[in-house]
Image (cartoon, rainbow, N blue to C red):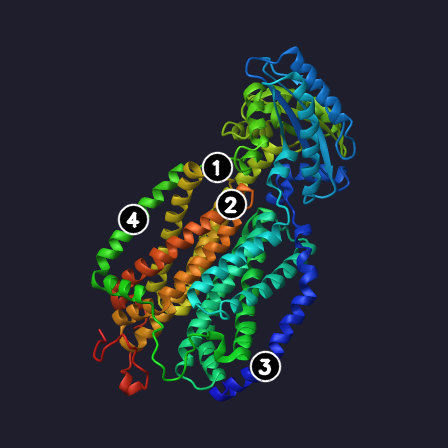
């Protein structure tokens, strides 16, 4: 039996200080564990591969042989347009000697090699790190190598260009100094500005941020624990965690505070107003969080270790955000009382307008011609989907570097002047008795340029295989597939091109499994919430259309606006899960309020009233989520920036067009049949039921 309203209110009042103190203690205790998350992230190639892939097995054998250390390559490239001179070659030789003297974690460089056209030369040195997250080693090493090579190159005079590329240079170019702290501060600043504009209060804007900070510490500590237990947490997942926690937490806070302010105009005591607000919003927040959490957990069906790990990370983020905003936030609001809303303090009987004038006006216009609005919006979103034609995948490591960094330019110079496969060879592991046959088979495979023996590795003999086609291009996949087929399952084919090929194959499988699973799960959850099949189908269809349109628009932005060199094969699934899950979040906010208002006034006025009351909240929530993920785009890694920019575009399309225009128009176009197989919410007359009639609904307007 549920407690009476005054009992619930009294309980909230008694617990307000214990809850606040408990959260402060929890944050202090967990801060150390949360700070350790960055050291537990895994960016090895194996983190993005299924455990059964051949390239994964090769990576694991290499890591075991290196006793847990990670070896990156730094390639120094020299080029002159009209051909290298004798002075240039002397400078390159001097640069190689200077790099050899660096020592430490920088190995003795390989021999200086000159291109066939005489316009370029290169040599390679290895950089050894203790862990895959020890970016400082690569940054320091690349800086030292660049300085040594640059000093030697100056002796040749002007015109000789020098670049440092390779995996070490890529790691250095994409490393984030104090990334977690910087990202958190950026996100908090953006959210603070938006909340100040929304609330126009010197106090109220701070409260959701305090809840989000507590949730961030809780989520990071829990994720660090999961990583310590063996879960793969990539830098991308770690970066997404911060944006997701702060964005989702702020969204939940907006909805709760909006309803609490409504109830403060109906109740004398703040605890009774909070009790009423929680009764109204908690089911909606639970349904919203459950939908996003379950959607994230669908990623456990992915084969890729990083995608598989993102599921629990996302789920932990959402649960942490929900816990903070439904416990800590109500407690601190009750501690501060009505003063939290100063200078616009809501009081009982005081006239006030909680609905948005802008979105109420939009609701009136949408309800006037819902069929036309639905058709026009669908056509516009369909046209935006055409932008998907500009999307293409690129597995090259340099595609993950923003701008025209030396790592990118150096790789382009290598590709122009040296054989295609030289920059990224394959590694073939064969048992000692089978290595000669494997070498002969590899040489006879079309698309293979050269095969050379290497040292033994973990009981295998090693072959280095150079391709005659671009190692990360479309031609490399068929060559790799043919080579593996000829060599058989007992011979392992790895190396960076094989890693990217296996990532692409796993991503295609994960797309085919996870995307339908997420849509079905979301459909079931919304159907249970609304108790209506047709409405659920409409909302999921609108969400899918919103995703397609947003992805099309951001694909055009990446290619023609930002100049990105393609997209990693796994990124679309990251983006799908976030856009669909967050879109459903706003679906639930809107549809639950429409159903509540329709029970009083009927579908048409209920849609107008529901949109007027939630449109402003959804817009503010969308802007906050866009701001949080916008902060992520400043990270120098293209993959992270692509996810961030996609969520920014998707959330804006969703909150400004799909959720606030298309969905209300579609509901009104279909009419009361939207609630099939039920008869829809009951619509008792206010005079009979005792419900207060919304101010925007006239007596008798129960169409």
Residue drawn at (55%, 64%), measured in percent from left and top?
A: 212
- Mark nearest the camera among 4 and 1 is 1
Query: What whole-number distance in Å separates the C-alpha atoms at marks 3 and 4?
Result: 51 Å
Instruction: Find the distance from the CA under tag 2 to the CA under tag 1.
Output: 10 Å
Q: Nearer the viewer, mark 3 or mark 4?
A: 3
Count of all numbered marks drawn on residues in the image:
4
CA distance separating discs 2 and 4: 26 Å
The mark lying in front, picked from 2 and 4, is 2
Q: Earlier in the sequence, mark 2 or mark 1?
A: 1
Secondary structure under tag 2 reads: helix
Q: Residues within 10 Å of mark 4 (few under 14, many from 20)?
A: few
- Quarter assignment of residue 56: top right
* Label 2, residues with CA under 10 Å away: few <14, some 14-19, many ≥20: many
Q: Find the distance from the CA under tag 3 to the CA under tag 1.
A: 52 Å
User: Dot 4: what SS?
Assistant: helix
Frontmost residue, 390 versus 22? 22
| Residue 304 percent coordinates (x, y) | 58, 46
CB contact under 8 Å: marks 4 and 1: no
Q: Nearer the viewer, residue 617 or 110?
A: 617
Q: Which residue is mark 1?
A: 564
Image location (x, y in percent) of residue 250: 49, 64
Give SS at disc 3: helix
Proximity of marks 3 and 4: CB atoms separated by less than 8 Å = no
Q: Are marks 2 and 1 in contact (CB under 8 Å)?
A: yes
Dot placed on the residue nearer the N-terminal end, 2 or 3:
3
Left or right? Give the position of 439 relative to 483.
Answer: right
Q: Which residue is mark 4?
A: 380
- Mark positioned earlier in the residue sequence (4 or 1): 4
Residue that label 3 marks: 15
Q: CA distance from mark 2 to mark 3?
A: 42 Å
Mark 3 or 4 closer to N-term? 3
Give the spatial CA distance, label 4 vs label 1.
Answer: 25 Å
């Amino acid at each position: 039996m549920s407690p009476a309203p005054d009992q619930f209110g009294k309980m909230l009042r008694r617990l307000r200080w214990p809850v606040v103190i408990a959260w402060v203690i929890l944050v202090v205790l967990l801060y150390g564990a949360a700070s350790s998350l960055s050291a537990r992230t895994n960016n090895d190639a194996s983190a993005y591969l299924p455990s059964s892939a051949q390239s994964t097995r090769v990576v694991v054998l290499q890591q075991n042989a290196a006793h847990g250390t990670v070896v990156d390559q730094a390639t120094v490239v020299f080029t002159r347009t009209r051909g290298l001179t004798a002075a240039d070659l002397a400078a390159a030789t001097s640069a190689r000697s200077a790099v050899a003297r660096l020592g430490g974690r920088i190995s003795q460089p390989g021999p200086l090699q000159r291109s066939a056209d005489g316009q370029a030369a290169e040599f390679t040195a290895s950089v050894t790190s203790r862990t895959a997250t020890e970016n400082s080693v690569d940054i320091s090493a690349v800086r030292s190598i660049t300085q040594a090579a640059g000093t030697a190159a100056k002796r040749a005079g002007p015109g000789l260009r020098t670049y440092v590329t390779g995996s070490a240079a890529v790691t250095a170019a994409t490393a984030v100094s104090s990334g977690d702290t910087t990202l958190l501060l950026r996100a908090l600043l953006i959210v603070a500005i938006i909340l100040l504009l929304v609330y126009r209060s010197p106090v109220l804007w701070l409260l959701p941020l305090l809840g989000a900070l507590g949730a961030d510490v809780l989520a990071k500590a829990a994720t660090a624990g999961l990583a310590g237990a063996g879960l793969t947490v990539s830098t991308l997942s770690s970066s997404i965690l911060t944006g997701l926690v702060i964005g989702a937490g702020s969204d939940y806070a907006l909805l709760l505070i909006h309803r609490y302010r409504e109830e403060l105009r109906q109740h004398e005591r703040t605890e009774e107003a909070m009790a009423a607000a929680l009764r109204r919003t908690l089911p909606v927040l639970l349904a919203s969080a459950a939908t996003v959490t379950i959607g994230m957990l669908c990623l456990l069906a992915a084969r890729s270790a990083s995608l598989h790990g993102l599921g629990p990370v996302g789920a932990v983020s959402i649960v942490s955000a929900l816990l903070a905003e439904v416990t800590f936030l109500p407690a601190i609001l009750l501690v501060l009382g009505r003063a939290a809303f100063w200078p616009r303090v809501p009081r009982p009987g005081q006239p006030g307008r909680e609905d948005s004038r802008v979105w109420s006006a939009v609701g009136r216009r949408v309800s006037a011609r819902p069929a036309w609005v639905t058709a026009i919006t669908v056509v516009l979103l369909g046209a935006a989907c055409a932008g998907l034609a500009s999307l293409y995948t690129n597995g090259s490591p340099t595609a993950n570097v923003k701008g025209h960094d030396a790592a990118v330019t150096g790789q382009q110079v290598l590709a122009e002047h040296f054989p295609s496969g030289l920059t990224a060879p394959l590694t073939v592991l064969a048992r000692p008795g089978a290595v000669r046959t494997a070498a002969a088979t590899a040489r006879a495979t079309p698309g293979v340029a050269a095969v050379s023996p290497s040292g033994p590795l973990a009981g295998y003999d090693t072959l280095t295989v150079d391709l005659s086609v671009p190692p990360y291009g479309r031609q490399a996949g068929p060559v790799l597939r043919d080579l593996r087929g000829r060599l058989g399952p007992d011979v392992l084919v790895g190396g960076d091109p094989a890693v990217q090929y296996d990532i692409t194959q796993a991503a295609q499988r994960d797309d085919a499994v996870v995307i339908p699973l997420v849509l079905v799960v979301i459909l079931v959850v919304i159907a249970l919430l609304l108790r209506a099949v047709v409405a659920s189908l409409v909302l999921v269809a609108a969400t899918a259309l919103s995703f397609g349109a947003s992805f099309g628009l951001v694909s055009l932005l990446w290619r023609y606006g930002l100049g990105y060199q393609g997209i990693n094969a796994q990124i679309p699934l990251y983006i799908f899960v976030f856009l669909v899950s967050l879109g459903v979040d706003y679906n639930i906010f809107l549809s639950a309020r429409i159903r509540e208002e329709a029970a009083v006034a009927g579908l048409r006025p209920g849609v107008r009233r529901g949109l007027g009351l939630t449109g402003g909240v959804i817009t503010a929530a969308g802007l906050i989520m866009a701001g949080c993920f916008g902060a992520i785009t400043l990270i120098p890694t293209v993959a992270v920036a692509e996810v961030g920019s996609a969520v920014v575009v998707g959330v804006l399309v969703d909150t400004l067009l799909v959720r606030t225009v298309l969905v209300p128009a579609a509901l009104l176009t279909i009419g009361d049949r939207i609630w099939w197989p039920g008869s829809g919410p009951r619509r008792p007359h206010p005079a009979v039921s005792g419900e207060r009639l919304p101010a925007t609904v006239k007596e008798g307007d129960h169409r």
